[in-house]
């Protein structure tokens, strides 16, 4: 039986474990690896993370304790000693600020429209057996596009910029799982807003097989004062 102190230590270690895996996953996309190597390392990392977590849970239930013997010769003790400081940093630096977020004073209104792309197309814009299997999971929203309309009231905004409209697109992640017609719907929804500017803030394209889509999708974006983009940490 796990005592309250053991449960607390277990939860702290699992939070540290999860945070470490997320950090490592993001670091993989920041070092410019070839896509095949990257995907292999991604799967290896996720498989190792899941295995460690599963073995840790089974071991704790079997022993009735989260840590068996407090010894630096025990790899589980050593890993727990790594995870606890990570959790101790994550809580004040990330978790608490996230929970404490409030609506910015500058936000005058915020409306959301959800577009069911699959319904519009009459078919699932998905390619690949794995992607189709994941899309079939109840509650999955992979084919739902959300359009957030936010009005900002900025006291120090120059008068010549009053009424300026900006469309912000992010994390399009063209890898082939979502097919070209999905991104064409994204472009149609964007153009329907008739914005002054379109800004794409990275993580656009990851697979060269999708490169030819750009002229037929993002190349058709329209904005009065231009279309701008930067690359993210998922581009090659």
Image (cartoon, rainbow, N blue to C red):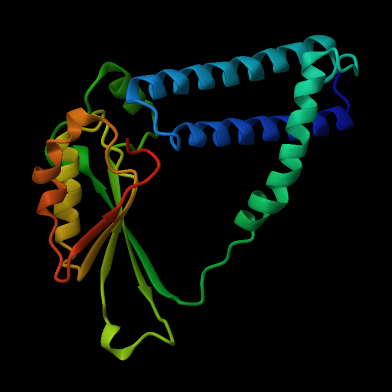
Against 164, is 184 above or below?
A: above
Against 202, is 68 above or below?
A: above
Count of numbered tags: 0
- Locate residue 177: give its quadrant: top left
> Is residue 124 visible in the rendered structure shown here?
no
Q: Is residue 38 left or right of residue 161?
A: right
- Locate residue 120: give its quadrant: top left
Residue at 37% across, 34% down: 140
Work out which residue is located at the far top of the displayed protein and give it: 62
Residue at 51% across, 31% down: 25
Work out which residue is located at the far bottom of the displayed protein and give it: 159
Q: What percent of the width, then of the height, locates residue 29?
A: 43, 34
Q: What percent of the width, then of the height, locates residue 126?
A: 22, 28
Q: Is residue 199 left or right of residue 134?
A: left
Q: What percent of the width, then of the height, locates residue 169?
A: 29, 54
Q: Decide which of 74, 15 is in the foreground and name it.
A: 74
Quadrant (top left/top right/bottom left/bottom right) for the N terminus: top right
Residue at 64% across, 60% down: 100
Against 3, is 69 above or below?
A: above
Quadrant (top left/top right/bottom left/bottom right) for the C terminus: top left
Q: Is residue 124 left or right of residue 60?
A: left
């Amino acid at each position: 039986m796990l005592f309250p102190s053991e449960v607390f230590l277990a939860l702290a270690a699992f939070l540290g474990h999860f945070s470490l895996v997320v950090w490592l996953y993001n670091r993989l996309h920041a070092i410019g690896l070839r896509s095949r190597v990257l995907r292999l390392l991604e799967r290896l990392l996720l498989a190792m993370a899941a295995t460690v977590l599963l073995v840790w849970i089974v071991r704790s239930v079997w022993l009735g304790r989260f840590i068996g013997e407090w010894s630096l010769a025990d790899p589980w003790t050593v890993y727990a000693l790594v995870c606890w400081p990570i959790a101790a940093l994550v809580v004040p630096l990330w978790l608490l600020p996230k929970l404490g977020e409030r609506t910015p004073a500058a936000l005058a209104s915020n409306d959301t429209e959800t577009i069911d792309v699959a319904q519009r197309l009459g078919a699932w814009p998905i390619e690949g057996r794995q992607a189709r299997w994941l899309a079939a999971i109840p509650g999955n929203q992979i084919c739902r596009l959300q359009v957030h309309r936010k009005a900002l009231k900025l006291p120090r905004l120059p008068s010549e910029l009053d009424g300026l409209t900006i469309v912000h697109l992010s994390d399009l992640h063209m890898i082939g799982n979502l097919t070209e017609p999905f991104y064409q719907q994204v472009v149609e929804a964007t153009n329907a807003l008739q914005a002054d500017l379109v800004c794409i803030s990275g993580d656009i394209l990851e697979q060269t097989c999708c490169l030819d889509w750009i002229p037929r999708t993002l190349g058709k974006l329209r904005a009065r004062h231009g279309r701008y983009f930067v690359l993210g940490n998922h581009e090659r």
